[in-house]
Amino acid sequence: MKRVPLIILLTFALLSVAFPSFAQQYTLVVDAPAVVALDEPFRVVFTASGKTKEFNPPQISDFQVLAGPTTSTMSSTNIVNGQRTHTYQESFTFVLLAKGEGKFTIPSASVVIDKDTYTSKAVTIEVVKSPQRGNSDATGNGVNNRDRYPTIGEDDLILSLTLSKNNVVKGEPVIATLKLLTRTNISGVEDIKFPSFNGFWSQEIEAPTSLEFVRETYKGEIYSAALLRKYMLLPQQTGELYIDPAEMICAVQVRSSAPSRSIFDDFFDNYQTLKKRMHTPKTKVNVKPLPGGAPASFTGGVGDYRLDVKLSRDSLNAHEAASLIVTVSGTGNLNLIEAPKVNFPPDFEVYDVKRRENISTSSSGSSGTRTFEYPFIPRSSGDFEIEPIEFSYYNVNSNKYITLKSEPEKINVARGEEAGAAVIPSGVNKQSVKSLGHDVRYIVTSSDHLRKGGTFVIASFGFWLGMGAVVVLFLVAAYIMERSIARKRDVAGMRNRRAKKVAKERLRRAESFLKQELYTAFYEELHKAILGYLSDKFMIPAGELNRDVIREKLAAKGVSEEIAGALEGVIDACEYARYAPSAGATAMANHYEEAVRVISEIES
């Protein structure tokens, strides 16, 4: 009986040796801002997850130490389902001030916990110049006019769209990041319109559901930045591609120091809510075509890839199924890679390719694997060989095409259950021999049922009539095709002809927004319908579309002054509606009917 406690102790000792992960793991982490101003004191905090015996601070030479290290502790005990957990943290805080601008590194610190030493990571801090303060007024009283008359400065709120690259080749990944930068107190955002990527294949990488601000530098100034969206773009066209602007409205709480109207106003801060509409500039991406001389095995891959080929089975019986599995892995435009070409032996029956992918998208682009499975069934026995598979891609870093080639895959096919039967070509059905009443039919020797044949087909009237009809149809088809090609070459005419059709489609969308009483969406769609119609109808580039040009084109077409004035009135209503409160469903319906009437008059 005395041996039982000893066995239990030995068991626990063996478990503690075999599973050291049961012991508590300690850490030392550092928390510091990534960006600070030159005259801004800031804190650097080292936090240990256990009770320390010794703290070795870092050697700080690039910053002035204003205070520290000051020590603080925090402990907590939690009981969940009868299980007690205890946590203990010890923090060491420094208050620092930068000595100059630039990027500086704070070395790592170390602590001793339970006879073991734990080290933190070194951190890099960027120091920028101090932000400029508000100017005094003309009287020299040092009163900031922005405080007296609250406004939102041009640089206080910025909507930024940045690209990882502006010069790429077709198919090369580009990361687009949309951020909101602020130096004020934002109380809300509304009417967000994200950018459209015409000419790109796009995929969202990050789409936060809430705004989380972190400190960043933008053009040498410190801002609080929040990520709105991050996209991966794959250009599908060459030339200069433009990313349409993103838009949003921000509501900002601005403090006002206007003269008080009551003695009680002196005890309270006065704030006003201002709104500002922001948009990103139109961003250009230069897309170059891929160089010529692409290998025959090139399927559009741009990036850095590896090729792996294997058989699901290399030994099987005839009429049994197997698969050839081709895996392309690496980084680049994996989403757009097509299946490589595989040459199977003639006796193999091949089925449709199956595709699988395991792709993760991050700030560096898409990476992972794309797998192609080729199912097949050998219809005869013997030793076969699948030819080497080639896969080519364009490497952006080396600016050249690279071809990957696999080894030949050998397959041993044994006789199956039907190996003794003849191989039936694909598409031919087996049928039993049928008796047609007699094995051998008698031979007819009389000529009672024979009659003289007619003339040759080429000498008949019907033949030449048919040939003439074919010639006429050919000429008619050639004439129709020539006219169709001429119409397609006439770009200006095509835009003019489709102007009304495009306008009708946009007006239908505007009408749907009208029925739903979506005020902003209705006027935006109505505005696009009118301006798009005028641009297509009169061949006016969108960048040159203004009131003078519109009036000149309408006058040249003979449109009356009344119609031209009505058109300008609808355009003014659409532009005013973007900044004014809703005027009601009646006004929206009137503006819609007026737009339909004006376009109809111009078309007549």
Image (cartoon, rainbow, N blue to C red):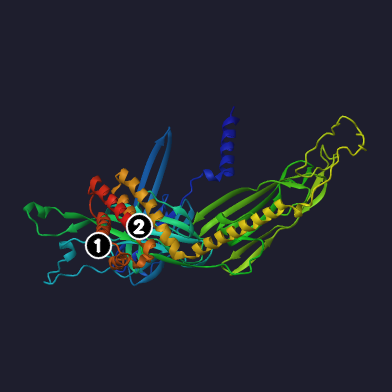
Say which residue appears at 59% left-offset and 53% top-offset: 369
Q: Residues within 10 Å of mark 1 (few under 14, many from 20)?
A: few
Say which residue appears at 48% left-offset and 59% top-offset: 200
Say which residue appears at 29% left-offset and 44% top-offset: 517
Q: Residues within 10 Å of mark 2 (few under 14, many from 20)?
A: few
Q: Which quadrant would the C terminus be assigned to in this image?
A: bottom left
Considering the numbered disc 2 on the image, is that residue within a helix, a strand or a loop? helix
- Lateral position of residue 80 relative to residue 430, left or right: left
Residue 108: image x %, image y %?
44, 62
Residue that numbered label 2 is attached to: 603
Residue that numbered label 1 is attached to: 561
Considering the numbered disc 1 on the image, is that residue within a helix, a strand or a loop? helix
Q: Amino acid at mark 2?
A: Glu
Q: Is residue 199 above or below residue 447?
A: below
Q: Is residue 42 above or below residue 455?
A: below
Quadrant of res 464: bottom right
Residue 75: image x %, image y %?
37, 45
Residue 55 visible (yes or no)? no
> How many numbered marks have been drawn onto this rendered protein structure?
2
Residue 426: image x %, image y %?
76, 44
Q: Nearer the viewer, residue 457 or 269?
A: 457
Q: Nearer the viewer, residue 181 or 266?
A: 181
Residue 332: image x %, image y %?
55, 59
- Closer to the chain start, of discs 1 and 2, is 1
Quadrant of res 29: bottom left
Q: Amino acid at mark 1?
A: Glu
